[in-house]
């Protein structure tokens, strides 16, 4: 009885994985490394987690439900991969720290690097943002290209092994349910026709499984408290398509954006230059307002109804190279693991599995990068894996707080109910900033730094900037200027 383990799984007890049995609790003392870490999910967040774990663990196994073929192939487990994504300047800096030269690798694949202020054509709710250099570097890319470049780097780490085509079905806890000791799952597809159950022992389990993480249910099945969840919904859906630019065309902008801010602005879009010849265009609206993805004429008409003319212009004058793909944007969802009193040790959660944002605001990848950097720092300062999980979740919640307040305050506008007092105050402040920004390049430059998570939002409350917020100045350029 003393060696019993508590298992959280939907099937029978799996057999011990031979390789995991030999290495699950082994520490490579000659290198000062710990034993074996398992990462659930091989997306952006999981790849960054594997990178920081490789600095302390003798072995890191990344398990992924999808197959991971070489190259930039889209995979079914990432339906939003066909839609625009952004890595804010703070997140890009962290990724560059973890993977030196990755920005150059992406640039070699065609992903342009440019100044955020001059390269973006941004239609704010109350006018066009100023087009001027702000000293914040940006890079636009296709998400599959980013993940492919990161995956190549992680595969090259000698401590890391990938196990793709593997569906995690549960978690094994110690007999007293105080720590995670293994993940349980099965292979998928023709490589494992019997789908034999497998146990992968671990000294640390990291859930980077995204919005589809099943960890709350696994904890509840083990008789542990289910974590509190907070949700702020969004009715938005994407319709996205890749276009080839006309030969020889020099783009006047690299990213064009029309921001939604309900209920004032309920429709928007984004167009990003992913390489020298292609742009990814995405139209965004509540599900009942966006035309079906196969109705090209209706989609072009919809694009023409927006205040930003760039989307319709690309759709009219460029050649589509993919079908139009439709996907729910997904709302805001925070699973508050940091509040659990009885969460097992050696089990931590980051990225969308912890807190997922409405991706229209572009915060998710950068928040995940901040969490990965946090994990790396905690690992570097610890003598053993014990106790890291609770410290990580507590600090990760602090990283999440400001992005959560801004995203959910904006999305409270979709609800007919009055927003909570804090959300109401944040909405008023955001609306004031966005009203003043089109006419005030100084204010907008500071807002860009806040938006890119380079500085705290509290910077906008400095007396020198409050003066810009409280005093109107003449508009430069006029409302008709299209960025």
Image (tube, rainbow, N blue to C red):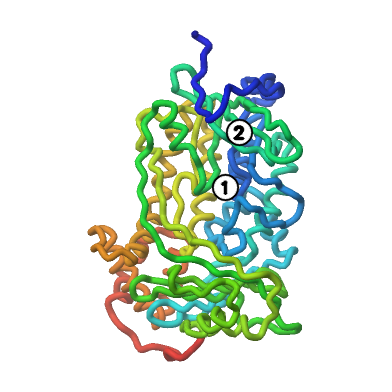
The x and y percentages for residue 155 are: 73, 43
Which residue is at a point 71% across and 36% down the rendered structure image?
A: 161
Residue 11's spot in the image, x, y percent?
56, 28
Count of number-bearing discs: 2
- Give the structural element (helix, strand or loop) at label 1: helix
Q: Residue at x 45, y 64 (%)?
A: 451
Placement of 335 over or under 136, stated as above or below? above
Residue 70 in the image: above or below residue 41: below
Front-most of 67 and 391?
Answer: 67
Q: Residue at x 36, y 70 (%)?
A: 262
Find disc 1 in the rendering and name its residue: 45
Q: Residue at x 61, y 32 (%)?
A: 185
Q: Residue 62, position in %: x, y?
A: 65, 38
- Find the distance from the CA under tag 1 to the CA under tag 2: 13 Å
Describe the element under mark 2 as helix, strand or loop.
strand
Q: Which residue is mark 2?
A: 38
Left or right, 407 with respect to 314, comes to left
Q: Using the rendered view, name the quadrant where residue 396 is placed.
A: top left
Image coords of residue 59 (percent x, y): 67, 30
Q: With 406 as the anchor, is 118 left or right in this view?
A: right
Image quarter of residue 422: bottom left
């Amino acid at each position: 009885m003393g060696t019993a383990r508590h298992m959280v799984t939907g099937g029978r007890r799996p057999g011990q994985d031979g390789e995991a049995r030999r290495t699950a609790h082994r520490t490579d003392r000659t290198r000062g490394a710990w034993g074996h870490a398992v990462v659930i999910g091989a997306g952006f967040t999981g790849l960054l987690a594997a990178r920081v774990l490789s600095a302390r663990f003798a072995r890191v196994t990344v398990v992924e439900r999808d197959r991971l073929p070489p190259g930039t192939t889209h995979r079914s487990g990432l339906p939003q991969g066909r839609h625009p994504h952004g890595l804010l300047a703070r997140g890009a800096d962290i990724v560059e720290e973890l993977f030196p030269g990755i920005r150059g690798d992406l640039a070699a694949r065609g992903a342009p690097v440019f100044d955020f202020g001059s390269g973006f054509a941004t239609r704010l709710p109350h006018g066009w943002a100023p087009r001027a250099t702000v000293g914040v570097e940006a890079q636009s890319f296709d998400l599959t290209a980013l993940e492919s470049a990161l995956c190549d780097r992680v595969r090259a780490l000698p401590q890391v092994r990938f196990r793709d085509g593997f569906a995690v079905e549960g978690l094994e806890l110690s007999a007293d349910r105080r720590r995670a000791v293994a993940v349980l799952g099965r292979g998928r597809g023709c490589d494992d026709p019997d789908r034999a159950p497998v146990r992968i022992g671990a000294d640390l389990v990291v859930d980077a499984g995204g919005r589809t993480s099943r960890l709350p249910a696994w904890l509840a099945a083990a008789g542990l408290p289910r974590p509190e969840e907070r949700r702020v919904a969004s009715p938005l859906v994407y319709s996205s398509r890749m276009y080839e630019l006309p030969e020889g065309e020099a783009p006047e902008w690299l990213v064009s954006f029309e921001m939604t801010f309900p209920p004032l602005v309920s429709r928007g879009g984004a167009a990003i230059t992913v390489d020298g010849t292609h742009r990814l265009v995405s139209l965004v609206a509540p599900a009942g307002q966006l035309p079906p993805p196969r109705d090209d004429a209706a989609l072009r008409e919809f694009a023409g109804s927006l205040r930003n003319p760039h989307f319709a212009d690309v759709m009219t004058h460029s050649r589509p190279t993919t079908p139009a793909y439709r996907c729910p944007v997904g709302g805001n969802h925070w699973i508050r693991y940091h509040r659990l009193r009885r969460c097992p040790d050696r089990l931590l959660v980051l990225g969308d599995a912890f807190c997922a944002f409405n991706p229209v605001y572009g915060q998710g990848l950068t928040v995940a990068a901040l969490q990965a950097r946090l994990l790396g720092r905690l690992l570097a300062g610890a003598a053993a894996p014990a106790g890291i999980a609770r410290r990580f979740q507590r600090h990760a919640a602090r990283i999440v707080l400001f992005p959560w307040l801004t995203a959910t305050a904006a999305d409270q506008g979709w609800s007919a109910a009055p927003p909570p007092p804090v959300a109401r105050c944040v909405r008023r402040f955001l609306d004031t900033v966005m009203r003043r920004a089109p006419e005030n390049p100084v204010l907008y430059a500071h807002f860009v730094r806040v938006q890119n998570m380079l500085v705290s939002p509290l910077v906008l409350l400095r007396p020198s900037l409050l003066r810009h917020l409280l005093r109107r100045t003449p508009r430069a350029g006029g409302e008709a200027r299209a960025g």
